[in-house]
Amino acid sequence: MSNEDITLTAGDAEARVEPRNGGRVGGLRVAGVELLRQGDRFGCFPMVPWCGRTRDGRFLDGATVRQMPLNAPPHAIHGTARDGAWRTARTLADEAVITYDLVEPWPHPGRVTQVVALTEDSLRLTMSVETYGSSFPAQIGWHPWFHRNLGSEDVQVGFTPAWQEERGEDHLPTGNRIDPKPGPWDDCFGMPGGVDVTLTWPGQLELKVSSREEWVVVYDEQEEAVCVEPQTGPPNGLNTMPRLVTPLEPLEATTTWTWRRL
């Protein structure tokens, strides 16, 4: 099938999926209002096969040290799939399935599948990673850029994490868990009951980002946007909390955004 942009519709919601541009959701409109920052680098991109920064671009793969390109020197950031062209496997009016084959510089052959499903009041993103050969460590996450302002008041970020990962000068977790601190943030938080973050644009819209995963990075240091990033482990997780993709068990995760008008 073609890998042209895909437009999904449900009620007054519309989502644009961009397979060629890293498999990202390039836009999400609710009643004609665009919720995601626009631009080739923005929207909501998949973070896979790792999330956030990997220290010095290196991780231990069994007994082998692997080196990834340093695209955020001195670290490697956000995986490789956001830089590649995905393929469209299936489309319906309100759902798209796209795939990406893992290639160099990632050392293991495998496939990433992402399902984007739209309803009148929600967007559900499900991603899985399977291996074509040996087992390997991996992570899954999403990096949405929500507009800070939809034309009225700035968005309010509401969540109650159990802890905050202490951030070192190198922007990576030190391994210490601390009490959550007030923003602005470029920080990872633990939510053992599952990710549950509410974005409220006063008088306009409330959007809840949820996931069964226990980790979320909140980034609100830019003027234009706020990012709420559910993921299967913390930054540098390939080294500290790797999840394993095996021939018998792929790695899978889901996040759902649910909204209502105010």
Image: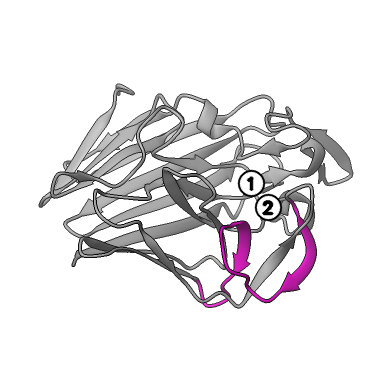
Q: Secondary structure at mark 1?
A: loop
Where does label 1 land, which residue?
52
Amino acid at pointer 1: Gly
Q: Is residue 208 above or below residue 11?
A: below
Q: Residue at x 29, y 47 (%)?
A: 35
Reading the chain from its start, which is encountered first: label 1 or label 2? 1
Q: Nearer the viewer, residue 45 or 81?
A: 45
The disc placed on residue 24 is none
In magenta segment, residue 185: yes
Q: Which residues are magenta?
A: 172-194
In magenta segment, residue 170: no
Work out which quarter of the rendered image holds the C terminus and state it: bottom left
Q: Secondary structure at mark 2?
A: loop
Q: Residue at x 46, y 24 (%)?
A: 85
**Residue 132's spot in the image, x, y percent?**
61, 37
Q: In the current view of this chain or complex, which residue is farthest to the front?
A: 153
Q: Residues within 10 Å of mark 1 (few under 14, many from 20)?
A: many
**Res. 135 in view:** no
Relative side of 31 to 163, left or right: left
Q: Which image quadrant for residue 207? A: bottom left
Relative side of 86 to 133, left or right: left
Where does label 2 land, which residue?
235
Q: Residue at x 47, y 51 (%)?
A: 227
Q: Residue at x 62, y 50 (%)?
A: 139
Calculate the distance from the C-alpha at mark 1 to the C-alpha at mark 2. Answer: 5 Å
**Residue 183's spot in the image, x, y percent?**
56, 62
Q: Which image quadrant for residue 184? A: bottom right
**Res. 174 in view:** yes
**Residue 75's spot in the image, x, y percent?**
75, 37
Relative side of 71 to 32, left or right: right
